Amino acid sequence: MRFPCVLRRRGVASAKSVGLPFQEILPSKIIEDIINDLGIKYRSRLYSPIVIVWSFLLQVLDPDHSCKNAVSKVISYLVAEGKERPSENTGAYCRARKKLPEILFKKLLDLSSQNLEKQVDKKDLWHGRHVKSIDGSSVSMPDTLENQKAYPQHPSQKVGCGFPIAAIGVLFSYCTGAVIGITIDTWETHDINLARQLSKYLKIGDILLGDRAFCAYTDICLWLNGGCDIVTRLHQGRVAKGKKKPKYTVVEDNKKTNKSKKKN
């Protein structure tokens, strides 16, 4: 698969390069159009939303995730562009990054995945069909009142001693390796419920690949009726055709049993 390899090579180069190399992969015009569509207003400053998006993406992928390293990349970029050199203090960068709305990254994700899908060659598909992989996981986040309200911590953790936890469901393209869709919910949300929220990204003729958590009869029927096939492992609660049911042995504590009989 040609395109994912290109992205991986670019990713390695980006982490080691000087400045903000994401401007080549994600042009400013694309970010600016989405910002205008969302009605986001900002002043003309060194840390513009466009610069922050580039630097934030690089910060996530760079082996050095520190804000200090991210600011050094921004400084290199601005100096190369002939603009004013900002302070090495990370405060302004962190405040500007905090102002970016979550919906902006959601829009960028949707747009980038759509553009990648357009560049897919039919020979890269499996018998002419798109294979999409789905999976679920969980993440913790900073312990703030807003996060605790939206994504409460696990009840087994004492108040003030835990962190907000969110369940995430992600749909990947097996061809491009890119994320097609993502959904975020509270920690107790089961993977199959996350999958239902991601079903809108499936198209007729797609093949959905998942683990045994997605082996649910009702959902399989819904996906099949929608023109998609699904491949999963058999759920642990179901017995495969032709196989014997597992034998379960109940072991009792004989000492406790004998004591109870004597008392009676």
Image (tube, helix red, strand yellow):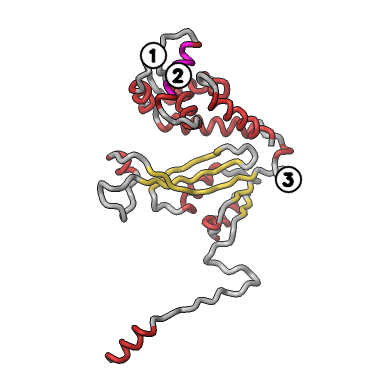
Which residue is rendered at x = 34% and y = 24% of the image? 95
Count all numbered tags in the image, as a single digit: 3
Whether tag 1 and tag 2 are in contact, CB under 8 A, the answer is yes
Residue 261, x across and y down, in percent: 32, 90
Name the residue type under label 3: His
Check residue 223 in the rendering and tell me which mark sits there, or answer none.
none
Give the structural element (helix, strand or loop) at label 3: loop
Name the residue type under label 1: Pro
Give the structural element (helix, strand or loop) at label 1: loop
Tell me which segment is drawn in magenta. 70-79
Residue 62, x across and y down, in percent: 50, 30
N-term-proximal mark, 3 vs 2: 2
Task: Write down the residue under mark 2.
Answer: 74
Q: Quarter-wise, where is residue 139 in the image? A: top left
User: Mark 1 Cα within 10 Å, few/some/many (few <14, many 20+)?
Assistant: some
Which residue is rendered at x = 71% and y = 34% of the image? 121
Task: Identify the image quadrant of the N terminus.
Answer: top right
Check residue 86 in the rendering and tell me which mark sits there, or answer none.
1
Which residue is rendered at x = 36% and y = 25% of the image? 94
Tell whether position 74 is magenta. Answer: yes
Tell whether position 90 is magenta. Answer: no
N-term-proximal mark, 1 vs 2: 2
Task: Write down the residue under mark 3.
Answer: 127
Residue 250, x across and y down, in percent: 45, 79
Task: Identify the image quadrant of the C terminus.
Answer: bottom left
